[in-house]
Structures are given as C-alpha cells and as structure tokens.
Amino acid sequence: MEIAFTLNGLAVKVDVKPADILTDVLRQKLGVLSVKKGCETGDCGACAVLVDGELVNSCVTLAPTVAGKSITTVEGLIVNGEMDIIQRRLAEYHGTQCGFCTPGMVMAIKALLNGNPHPDEAEIRRAIAGNLCRCTGYQKIVEAVQSITA
C-alpha cells in the first residue's frame, strides 16, 4: 500500500506493508539515518520522532498509522544549515558522548519545550526518562536544557 505523509516539512509517498515498522521505513526507504534502532520494544528512545508534534517511539509504530500525518526527525530541526538550539546546547554542555541516544534525546527535549518552554529540573528529567543514555549520566543533558530555558 502507498502512504503519504509529511517528513520534515516535505510531502513524501512510500510503499509499505501493513506490518512495516516506522523506524524501518524511515531508515531503509527514506534514508533518515538519525532514527536509530536500539531495543525495538519502545524502551530506549533511540528511535523517537515527533508525529504531529507528539513524541513517538517509531520502533513500535506501524508505518501505515502515520498516513496523512507530519513527522519530524532531527534532520527537520536544522534550518538553513544551522542546528537547533537543543543540538547546539547539548554540544556546548557536553551532553553527548557516543551519540547513539542523541537524536532521540533531542526529539524528547523538543517535545518537552514545545509544550513547556520553562520546565524545572524534575520536568526535564521526566521528559527524558524514556531515553536510555549509557554514557552521560544525564546531568549534562539536564544542564543543557536548563541553559535554554533560563
């Protein structure tokens, strides 16, 4: 079946099977490599994207369910070749190390700030709780977000 949706502001059409997972469609059919395959059970957040502005783990999302919707990945946050402030601050505050979790973490932070531009530390920690990071200990990530909202 062919589905159409908006990906990072551009209209796309892609052939999918009813059981195709969104992560696979984004990576294999549309070349969006920021969306990572981690746990494949919705527990690590490496595959997180925004679907109509809501944070979704794409590894547990059937591709046909996004027909007619708008999907944003990290690539969609770059404007005129410039990284989003979230990406810049994570780099400045050393909130990334290996980088595997970073795209999903960025999307979780984006979803948080879209709904709450001035979260406190507890709200930040809750928002990123679904994103497994084995390198940073999360403190630098929290500090990076706090620098945006200060």
Image (cartoon, grey):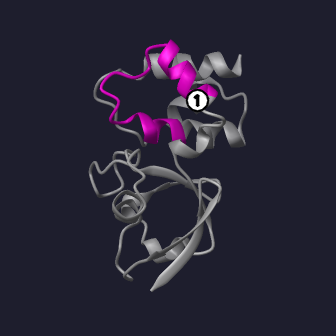
Determine if residue 27 is in view: yes
Q: Please tell me in which quadrant of the rendered image residue 34 appears.
A: top left
Give the percent coordinates (x, y) of residue 81: 60, 32
Query: Which region shows up in magenta?
Result: 85-107
The amino acid at mark 1 is Met
Q: Label 1 belongs to which residue?
A: 83
Foreground pick, 97 / 124: 97
Describe residue 45's horizontal placement relative to residue 12 as left or right: left
- The answer to whether residue 31 is left or right of residue 56 is left
For residue 81: magenta? no
Whether residue 127 is visible, yes or no, is no
Q: In the image, residue 144 lies at what x, y percent?
A: 55, 19
Q: Where the C terminus falls, by quadrant?
A: top right
Q: Secondary structure at mark 1?
A: loop
Mark 1 neighbour class, 10 Å CA radius: few under 14, some 14 to 19, many 20 or more: some
Name, please, the residue furthest toward the bottom. Answer: 1
Query: What residue is shown at x 59% (from left), y 69% (from top)?
Result: 5
